[in-house]
Amino acid sequence: MSKIVGRTLDFLELFAEQKRPLSLSDISRLLNIPVSSCHDVLQALTERGYIYEVSPRGGYYPTLRLHGIAQTIAENDPVPLRAEPLLRDLRDHLDETVLLAQISGLEATYLLAFEPSHPLRFRQQVGNRISSLHATSAGKALLGSLDEAAMDSVLKSIQLPALTQHTTTSKAALRRQIELGRARGWYLNEGESQDGVTTISAVFAWHVSSYIVTVAGPSGRLGPKLEEAARSLVLLCAQLSMRPAPRAEK
């Protein structure tokens, strides 16, 4: 790394660490850099609007310019492009359908869909929305991503029609499933939305948006590798959100 770039980053990180205005001599002392070198970096950052002088002899502090740029970058992060190779790898590893959906309010729209090699497979069209909040793992994951007040409000008004003989139609049972999903980091649908289909979903957040990753397949094929699939799914979502994976719970 070039020295000037390194020193510029050192400046910004120093303000984050100190959380207070700093004088030129403060910066020089804390970074162990000659005052003349500090002055050059400080002058450049001030001229570009990244740092301002709080008051005469009051020290310097970063402006909101850097925050605004970082926010714009984060808001336009191409999450699907970043997620695509990881989702493909998960599909290849499990040889089952893998889906990515973005949450918007109480709906989620599928952005990516990767199908397995098997002729018998779970299909979902990009652009479709999740079909149910109570009978799909993606719907349960969406509910699990809400805060308690919002989830309570939804559960009071939601209808739980039976889509199959395995569909959860009790609000108390649905709440227990969501709480379990939160604890272990993934949500399960075993034949609740379609007979003979199992799906698991997990949520990851990036900046101001939340996304759902789903693995889906015939119950007879996905069931025996459910634990492996769930473990891989949770690790993938942790990687996409750039956070540690939660400890696995049985």
Image: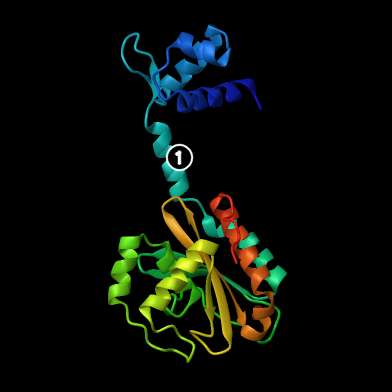
Task: Give the structural element (helix, strand or loop) at label 1.
Answer: helix
- Residue drawn at x 41%, y 36% as measured from the top left: 67
- Residue drawn at x 61%, y 68% as measured from the top left: 230
Q: Residue 195: give x, y in percent of width and height.
A: 54, 90
Establish if 167 lies above or below 75.
Answer: below
Q: Is residue 1 left or right of residue 56?
A: right
What amino acid is at disc 1?
A: Ala
Between 182 and 54, the one lying in front of the other is: 182
Establish if 50 lies above or below 241.
Answer: above
Residue 217 occupies which quadrant of the picture?
bottom right
Q: Is there any visible trace of residue 249 in the rendered image? A: yes
Establish if 193 lies above or below 53.
Answer: below
Viewport quadrant of the C terminus: bottom right
Color style of the picture:
rainbow
Between 9 and 175, the one lying in front of the other is: 175
- Residue drawn at x 41%, y 52% as measured from the top left: 208
Q: Residue 220: give x, y in percent of width and height.
A: 66, 85
Q: Is there any visible trace of residue 185 in the rendered image? A: no
Q: Residue 152: give x, y in percent of width and height.
A: 31, 67
State the residue position of label 1: 70
Viewport quadrant of the N terminus: top right
Q: Is residue 113 left or right of residue 130?
A: right
- Residue drawn at x 44%, y 89% as measured from the top left: 163
Between 18 and 109, the one lying in front of the other is: 18
Residue 214 occupies which quadrant of the picture?
bottom right
